[in-house]
Amino acid sequence: MNDTPEALTETRGGPENGSMLVRRSRRVGGSVRVPGDKSISHRSLILGGMASGQTTVKGFLSSDDCLCTLSAFSRLGVRIMQPDPSSVHMDSPGFAGLMEPDAILDFGNSGTASRLMCGVLSATSFFTVMTGDDSLRKRPMKRVVDPLTAMGARIDGPGEGSRLPLAIRGTSLKGIHYFNTHKSAQVKSAILLAGLNAAGSTTVEEPLQTRDHTERLLPLFGGKVTRDNLRTTVHPGRLTGTLLHVPGDFSSAAFFLALGLLTPASSLTLDGVGLNPTRTGLLRVLEAMEARSLHIVPAGPPDSESEPYGSIHAGFSELRGIDVPPEWIPNIIDEIPILAACAVCARGTTTIRGAAELRVKESDRIRGIVSALSVLGVPFEEFPDGLSIGGLGPEPRLKGGSVDSLNDHRIAMAMAVLGTRLPEGEFLQIRGTDFVSTSFPGFSTLFNQVTE
C-alpha cells in the first residue's frame, strides 16, 4: 500500500552492526498474519521429539530460537523434515530411543529451549552438554537446576549450575511437589517435562497462573495431566505423536496492536492470533488504559485442552496512563517493552513495578528501555523492579536519534513502533537489531506492508 518511502528500513550485518532506521508513519491499515507462536512452537517440537511415532506441526515459527530446538532433536536421533518454513514433520523413536548427541547442543539465544530441555535431558540415559550465545550464557539457570536436582538430576556448570554451559548426566528421577516461587512458566514446564519420565507423579504449584501451553499440549500427545486451580500434576507415561496447529504469536502481534492504537486514522486487523488467557494480559492493561478501538473476535469457544485463537482489530485510541497492578506482571512480562511505547503516547504517568525479572531477560530490559526513552526525550523514573513513564500524549514531541537495542529483539521492535510517532523529518536509528529474527523473521516486511 506504500507509494512513499518505507517507514522502516533495515541494514543486516552481525549483532554489532545490524540496524533499523524508522520514520514517522501517517497511517496504518490492512490485515496481518503474524508468524506462529514461539512458546508453542518450542513445546510442540519438544513433545514431538519425546513422543513415539510421527508428529506434524503446522504454523511452526521458523525463527532462530525454534530452529535451535529443531537442531537439538535432530542430534538426539529424531528424523526431521521441513517441507516449508511453517511445517515440520518429526519421526521419533520415543523418549527411550533418544540417543546421546555427537556434539554440544547449542541453543543460541533461547532461554525457553535451554531451560525446558534441562528437564527433558535430565531423565535420559546419556550425557549431554548444553550451551548458548554470549547473552544466553549470562542468564540464570539455577532456577531450573535446583528443582531438577531435587528430583535426582545430575547437572554441573559454572556457579553450581547457575549459568550455561551445563553438563547433564541423565539418570533416574523421582517425582516431587514444587512451589514455583519464580512465577515462571519455563521453570514449571522444565519440571513437568522431567516428571513425564520420573518415578511417581510430579506437581508444580504456583502463587499465580503462568503460561499453560505445556499443560494444554500434553493431552494431545496422550500425556496424563491433572489441573486443579494453581496446581498442575503430571503422571509418567508414554507419549504418542500427533498433528497440531500453532496459532499466531500474541507477543509478536502486540507490536502491531500498538502500531494500530498509536497511529491516527488507523485500522489494522490481525488474523489467527493465539488468545490463550495466560498470554493476553496486555489486552487487560490496554483496556484499563482506555483503548476503546480494540476488538477481539474469538474463532470459537475455548476449552482447557486447546489453544484458543481469533482475530484482533486495532484502531487509533487516546490512551491514559495507569499504575499497572503487580499481579498482572507475570502475564505481560514479554510485552512490557511495547507497553512502554504505548505509555509514551498516553496522557499521564504509567507505572510498572514488580518486574525485576526484566533485568535477566535477553538483556537488562529495564535499562534498555530507559536508555532509549532518554534519547527520545521521554520523562521516566527507573526502579530496581520497573519504571514509570511520563506520557506525552497521542502526538508526542519526540526527538530523533540513535538508540541501542542491547541486541534484544523485543526492545528493537518496540522502538520501531515508537519511532513511527516521531515528528516529520525526524528519524530513529535502532542499533543491534539482528536478533529480531530470534522471534519474528520478516518483521520489517510486515511492518512496511501496513504503514504509510
Image (cartoon, grey):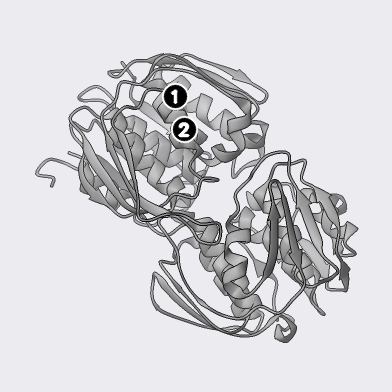
Label 1 crowd (10 A; few <14 / some 14-19 / many >=20): some
Residue 221 x %, y %: 60, 74
The residue that label 2 is drawn on is 284
Q: Residue at x 17, y 30 (%)?
A: 265
- The CA span between labels 1 and 2 is 6 Å
Q: Looking at the image, is 55 positioned above or below residue 267? A: below
Q: Residue at x 63, y 75 (%)?
A: 222
Residue 12 x %, y %: 37, 53
Residue 173 is left or right of residue 189, and the answer is: right
Residue 11 in sight in this render: no
Type of the residue with mark 1 = Ala
Q: Which mark is residue 367?
A: none
Q: Quadrant of the C terminus?
A: top left
Q: Looking at the image, is 71 positioned above or below residue 372? A: below
Q: Residue at x 44, y 65 (%)?
A: 62
Type of the residue with mark 2 = Arg
- Circle 1/circle 2 CB separation < 8 Å: yes
The residue that label 1 is drawn on is 288
